[in-house]
Amino acid sequence: MFLVTGATGGIGRRVVRLLRERETPVRAFVRLTSRYGELEHRGADIFIGDLQQQKDIQKACQGVQYIVSAHGSDGNPLALDYRANIELIDQAKANEVQHFVFISVLGAERGYEDAPVFKAKAAVERYLQSSGLNYTILRPAGLASNLLPLAERFRDTGIYLLIGDPKNRTSIVSTDDLARMVVESVTAAGARNQILPVGGPEILLREDIPRILGRIFNKEPIIINLPIFVIDGLRGALAFVNPQLQKNLGTFRTLLANEFFCTNEQIARLEGIFGWKLETLENFLRRYLAV
Ligand SMILES: NC(=O)c1ccc[n+]([C@@H]2O[C@H](COP(=O)([O-])OP(=O)(O)OC[C@H]3O[C@@H](n4cnc5c(N)ncnc54)[C@H](OP(=O)(O)O)[C@@H]3O)[C@@H](O)[C@H]2O)c1
């Protein structure tokens, strides 16, 4: 039995689907408010709880052999990116779990001081590595599925909003490829006890994304490029109104202000470990947008 946290999220939902397609038993950790009907319909065992509650994590981990941590921060990186993962790892040990797959983030090791999510991921990575469990830490770049709402908007307006340097490099990964890596990490010998940077097969410039959308929809993109100090201004104003949101925006700023891409060697290594070719961003978008 797998336990998947964040089972209704971009990655988690795909992991559960894939496991059920392979007729593997899976417990989906969801909230009462989550949209989990599809997962139930596919035969997942639905566990309703809150990852901010230790006792819910303890109950959810009983009798599982594999744990996939794929939940998000929900505005509270300390409680969710950090504490919930530490508790999941402790419970994995208590239940003698065979393999723990942790979704981290590309650049977790860079020590960005102003980015709570990155700091939490780095601390959890270290905790997992010293836990004695079998593990795979996947460090994805941006997810292709995040671009789907932007693509829909582009289809209607031709407008693409780009904050920060358009020449920054990125290697956006197909969310379906990432989900497949999660599932296969527990059996692929080369993924055991590894930290794997995960990106798509091409190194893109951020300005390539509207160009790809332009090709897909046969539309000349109108790129609105805002400088990064727009975010700084917003954060400055929030410091008085909502200090927590101001801190959390540090992660968003870090993502916009830096480059997150995988080298060709890292991609070749991934393809070698899993034994299949990674999908391009354009292919992913065409599949989902049916164009
Ligand atoms: N998105 C990216 O580009 C990206 C890139 C690199 C790494 N990552 C990492 O990948 C992971 C998954 O990202 P994602 O984009 O797939 O996530 P997502 O779509 O934002 O989904 C977050 C999931 O976490 C669940 N969740 C949040 N708070 C919870 C709580 N208190 N109790 C139980 N469940 C809770 C949500 O449930 P509800 O459905 O109830 O809201 C949802 O299923 C995250 O750890 C993220 O840091 C993401």
Image (spheres, helix red, strand yellow):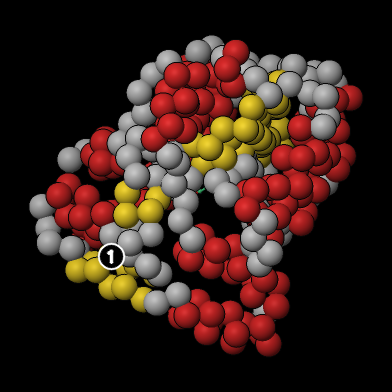
Residue marked by disc 1? 160
Is residue 232 rendered to the left or right of residue 284? Answer: right
The structure residue drawn at horizontal position 65% and vertical position 48%, both measured from the top left corner, is 109
Residue 68, x across and y down, in percent: 65, 30
Q: Quadrant of the N terminus?
A: top right
Residue 163, x across and y down, in percent: 39, 69
112, above or below 267, in the image:
below
207, above or below 72, in the image:
below
Q: Quadrant of the C terminus?
A: top left
Q: Quadrant of residue 39?
A: top right
8, above or below 61, in the image:
below
The structure residue drawn at horizontal position 65% and vertical position 20%, both measured from the top left corner, is 192
Residue 48, x across and y down, in percent: 71, 38
The structure residue drawn at horizontal position 54% and vertical position 19%, both measured from the top left corner, is 184
Seen from the viewer's position, the closer of residues 228 and 147 is 228
Name the secondary structure under disc 1.
strand
Give amino acid for label 1.
Tyr
Q: How many marks?
A: 1
Does any portion of residue 82 appear in the rendered image? yes
The structure residue drawn at horizontal position 59% and vertical position 69%, both measured from the top left corner, is 249
